[in-house]
Amino acid sequence: MSQLRPRSFTSIEALRQSFDESFSIPALASEADLEQFLAIRSAGQPLALRVAELTRLEGRREIVGLPVENRDLLGIAGIQGRLVPIYCLASLLGLGRDAADWRWIAVCCLPDLLGLAFESLDACFSTPRTSILELGGERAPREPVQHAVRFAGAVRNVVQLHSLQAVLRKIALGAGGAIKES
């Protein structure tokens, strides 16, 4: 029995020391203080999408082209039994057109269901809300890029999907969704 006593005493001291040291460790951010993002690339540019604004993420699938004048619209695809318009994200943001190289579709259901095609998915990450950078300059309040985040040594512009959808709605209303005559 005398051999058990020192081990018990040692483990109690270790627990006490561990408990005391826990107060010297900085508090971790609560999940409510974190925001989740997808780190993506479109036309080679590092971007981020807020996970909270997404309905789902789909791999490349067949898209049926439509005879419309909107060059940003790649066509429609069937996703979970629904027809979803698929847009080229790079083209919408003025980064060029990676229509042939896209591999992923970010599906969002803001007021309207739509898909955004982009070339690569780098990671999913969380960052404290306090570390989200607000971009300066003379940006319109509904411009699709207002914020940026740091991830893996790069600063990524955050695409605001609500603003992007407002831009798409404005384009559709202005062009009337004109269908080309064949």
Image (cartoon, grey):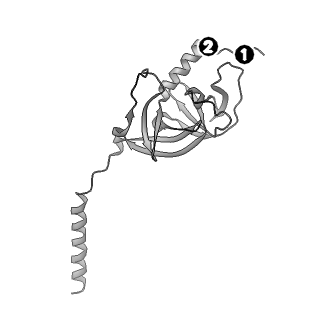
Q: Front-most of 171 and 97?
A: 97
Q: Residue at x 23, y 76 (%)?
A: 10
Q: Residue at x 75, y 14 (%)?
A: 181
Badge 1: residue crowd in 10 Å (few <14, some 14–19, many ≥20): few
- Name the residue type under label 1: Lys
* 3D distance between C-alphas at marks 1 and 2: 12 Å
As helix, strand or loop, the secondary structure at mark 1 comes to: loop
- Residue 179 lies, in percent from the top left, at 70, 16
Mark seen at residue 180? 1
Location of residue 95 with respect to 24 vertically, above or below: above
Mark seen at residue 175? 2
Which quarter of the figure has residue 149? top left
Location of residue 24 with respect to 30 vertically, above or below: below
As helix, strand or loop, the secondary structure at mark 2 comes to: helix
- Name the residue type under label 2: Ala
Badge 2: residue crowd in 10 Å (few <14, some 14–19, many ≥20): few
* In this rendering, position of residue 167 left or right of residue 176: left
User: As drawn, which residue projects farthest toward the front?
Assistant: 137
- Residue 146 lies, in percent from the top left, at 43, 28
